[in-house]
C-alpha cells in the first residue's frame, strides 16, 4: 500500500530533504513510499536542489484522495500538516520538535530526538538498518542540518548535528563550511521577495491559551534592510491576521551571522509577548539579542506566558 | 539532575519491567535515573519478581516533589500517568501505544513502535547503544513480552516480539514456554481477589467523544468462573462509575488459552458498544470471540463508534 512522506507546510530545507531521505530509507526497507511537499521550495532549498541536481518534490495540499496512510517528518502538529490529516492514518513520524495537537487511534512508529535537525536523526536510522546513504542524498542531508542549525550557530545545535554534518560531508565530498555559507546567503536573498512572500515564507501556526499565534522568521545578514520595509510588512501582516483569523503575529527578523533577532508584533495580546521575553515593546518592536531559534527560544516562553 | 522512570497506573508486568530496564540503560549511558511505579505489582508481576529475586519498585503518586523531569515507559496519555504530570518535564518516552492526550512544550526523546511490548523496543535500544543486558534483566524483560503478548497468542504480537523473547531466553537461560505458562497461570489466580480488586487491577481510562470510558481486562482460564460473581462485579462497577465519574465501564473477561472475551458493560451509552463491535448486548453482555487485545481490538473500534 503506497504511502506519502512529507514535512511541514511552508517547507524549509529540512522539511523537503527529510521527506526525501526517509522515503528513500523506507523504500530500501521494502515500503512503497513517495516523498512530496506541502509547498514550493524556498530560495535556500532551491539553491540546495540546484546544487545537487535534485528535482523539487511534487506539491500536495491533501493526501486522502491518493493514499490511506502517510509518514510525517519534521513536524507533528496537525495545523502544520496536510489539510485532511484526520482522514488518513499516520504510520510513521520522525521529528525533532515538541509534541502537541497530535493524536492517533492506532499504535505507530514515532521517533523524535531533541537534536537540531530531522536529517540528523535520519542518518541514525540509516545506520541502525545498515543502509548506505548515496552521495547526493548525503549532500542534501548536510544542507538540511546546516540550514536548521545556521551552520552550528543556533542554540538548538547538538554534538550529534555537528558530527553528522562532518560524516555526511565525507560521503558527499563537500567542503561543508564554504558550501554552507553560500547556501545560507542564497537563502537570505530577500530583495527579490514581496512583503507577502516574506511574511508567509517560514510561518507556522500555534494554538496557545485559546489564541491562534502565527510566528514567521526571516533570516538575513542585515536586519535594518528588512525594516526599511516595515510599514508595508505591518500592513500585510494585519491583513493576513484578519483574513486567516490569527490573533497574534510575531515576525522574527534574525541576523544569522551574529544571532540577534528584532521582533515585530502585530495583533493581541501584546502584553503576553512582553511577559514572555521580559521586554517592553516600543512601537510594537523589541530587540531579542541571542535569539535565533523559534522552537527553543520563542515558542516555549510564549507558551508559558499564555 | 535526577529523573524518575515509570510505567502507567495499575502497572502490569511491562509497565514495571520496562521502567527498570530503561532506567538501567539510561544509567549505563550516564544519566541519573530511578525506576519507580504508579502502583503495587499485580499477581503475575509478583510471580515474576519473586522468580528472578528482584525487589518491587517504590510506589509514587506524584513526581514534582522530588524531581523536575521524568521518563515515561509503556504509556503516554496523561490520565494514565502521575497525577502531577503537568508540573514536570517529560524528557523521554518509550512506548508501544497510540499517542493521545500528550503534549510537551519542549522537544524530547520519543521512541514508539507498533510492537507487542515496550520491552521489545528497549532491547533494540540496548543494542543500538552496545550495552549488554544482564541475565536477571533479560528474564524480567522476556516476562514482560510474554505477559503483553499472552505467549504470542495476542494479535498485537509481532515477529520482533517473538525473536526478542528467544534472544532474551538465551541470556537468561530460561525455558520461556514452560516458564511463560506458569507465569500466565500465576497471573490468573482470581479466587483470592475481591470484586473491587478485579475491577481495578488492569483498568485504564480513555476520553472518547467527551465521555470518560473505563476499560478493565481480567485474564482467566475459565470465563464462567468469573461470571459466577457477575452480580457483585456489576455492583462494584456501578459504584465506581458514580464515585469516579466514569460514564461507561467495559469489563473484558478474556480466556488467555483460547483467546475469547466476554464483555460486561455498565453505564452509558450502551448503543455505542453495540455499534463498535457489531453485537447486540443481552443483559449488558456480549461475546467477542477472538478478542484479546484492548489496545488493538477494543479501543480503536470503540473510538470510531464514538
Image (tube, coloured by chain):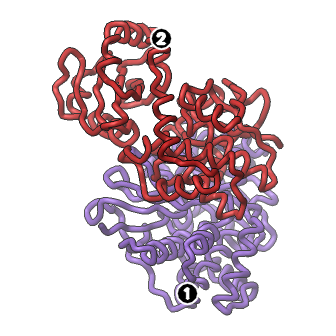
Chain colours: A purple, B red
Viewer-closest of A103 and B215: B215
Specify whether residue B123 is in view. yes
Residue name at image x 29 percent, y 25 percent: B263
**In which image quadrant can residue A133 be found?**
bottom right
Q: State how far apart marks 1 and 2 are (Cα).
A: 62 Å
Q: Is residue B305 left or right of residue A31?
A: left
- At label 2, counting other C-alpha atoms closer than 10 Å, the crowd grade (few under 14, some 14-19, many 20 or more) is some
Position of the N terminus of chain A, as image quadrant, is bottom left
Residue that label 2 marks: B194
Q: Position of residue A295 (x, y in %)?
A: 65, 55
Q: Which mark is residue A134?
A: 1
Residue A242 position, x and y percent, is: 46, 49
Marks 1 and 2: CB-CB under 8 Å? no
Q: Quadrant of residue A263?
A: bottom right
Rate crowding at label 1 as few (under 14), some (14 to 19) or many (20 or more) other CA atoms within 10 Å.
few
Q: Secondary structure at mark 2?
A: loop
Q: On screen, B202 above or below A112?
A: above
The chain holding disc 2 is B
Camera sees residue A306: no
| Chain name for mark 1 | A
Of the 4 image quadrants, the one containing the C terminus of chain A is top right
Residue A185 versus residue B70: which sits nearer the camera?
Answer: B70
Could you tell me which residue is drawn at 35 percent across and 67 percent down? A3
Q: At 75% across and 53% down in the image, what residue appears?
A: A286
Give the secondary structure at mark 1.
Answer: loop
Judging depth in this view, the residue of A124 and B53 nearest the camera is B53
Question: Both on one chain, marks 1 and 2?
Answer: no
Q: Which mark is residue B252?
A: none
Amino acid at each position: 500500500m503506497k504511502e506519502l512522506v512529507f514535512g511541514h507546510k511552508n517547507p524549509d530545507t529540512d522539511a523537503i530533504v527529510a521527506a526525501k531521505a526517509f522515503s528513500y530509507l523506507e523504500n530500501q526497507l521494502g515500503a512503497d513510499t513517495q516523498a512530496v511537499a506541502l509547498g514550493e521550495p524556498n530560495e535556500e532549498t532551491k539553491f540546495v536542489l540546484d546544487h545537487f541536481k535534485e528535482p523539487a518534490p511534487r506539491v500536495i495540499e491533501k493526501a486522502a484522495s491518493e493514499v490511506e496512510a502517510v509518514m510525517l517528518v519534521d513536524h507533528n502538529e496537525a495545523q502544520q500538516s496536510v489539510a485532511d490529516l484526520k482522514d488518513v492514518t499516520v504510520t510513521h513520524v520522525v521529528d525533532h520538535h515538541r509534541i502537541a495537537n497530535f493524536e492517533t487511534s492506532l499504535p505507530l512508529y514515532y521517533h523524535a530526538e531533541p537534536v537540531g535537525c530531522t536529517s540528523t536523526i535520519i542518518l541514525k536510522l540509516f545506520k541502525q538498518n545498515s543502509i548506505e546513504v548515496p552521495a547526493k542524498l548525503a549532500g542534501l542531508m548536510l544542507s538540511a542540518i546546516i540550514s536548521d542549525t545556521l551552520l552550528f550557530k543556533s542554540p538548538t545545535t547538538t554534538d550529534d548535528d555537528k558530527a553528522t554534518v562532518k560524516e555526511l560531508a565525507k560521503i558527499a565530498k563537500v567542503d561543508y563550511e564554504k558550501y554552507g555559507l553560500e547556501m545560507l546567503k542564497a537563502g537570505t536573498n530577500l530583495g527579490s521577495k514581496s512583503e507577502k512572500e516574506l511574511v508567509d515564507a517560514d510561518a507556522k501556526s500555534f494554538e496557545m491559551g485559546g489564541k491562534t499565534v502565527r510566528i514567521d522568521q526571516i533570516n538575513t545578514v542585515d536586519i535594518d534592510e528588512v525594516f526599511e520595509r516595515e510599514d508595508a510588512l505591518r500592513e500585510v501582516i494585519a491583513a493576513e491576521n484578519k483574513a486567516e483569523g490569527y490573533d497574534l503575529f510575531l515576525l522574527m527578523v534574525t541576523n544569522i551571522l551574529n544571532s540577534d533577532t528584532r521582533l515585530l508584533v502585530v495583533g493581541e495580546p501584546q502584553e503576553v509577548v512582553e511577559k514572555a521575553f521580559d521586554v517592553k515593546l516600543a512601537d510594537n518592536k523589541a530587540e531579542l539579542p541571542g535569539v535565533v531559534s523559534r522552537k527553543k527560544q520563542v515558542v516555549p516562553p510564549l507558551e508559558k506566558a499564555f
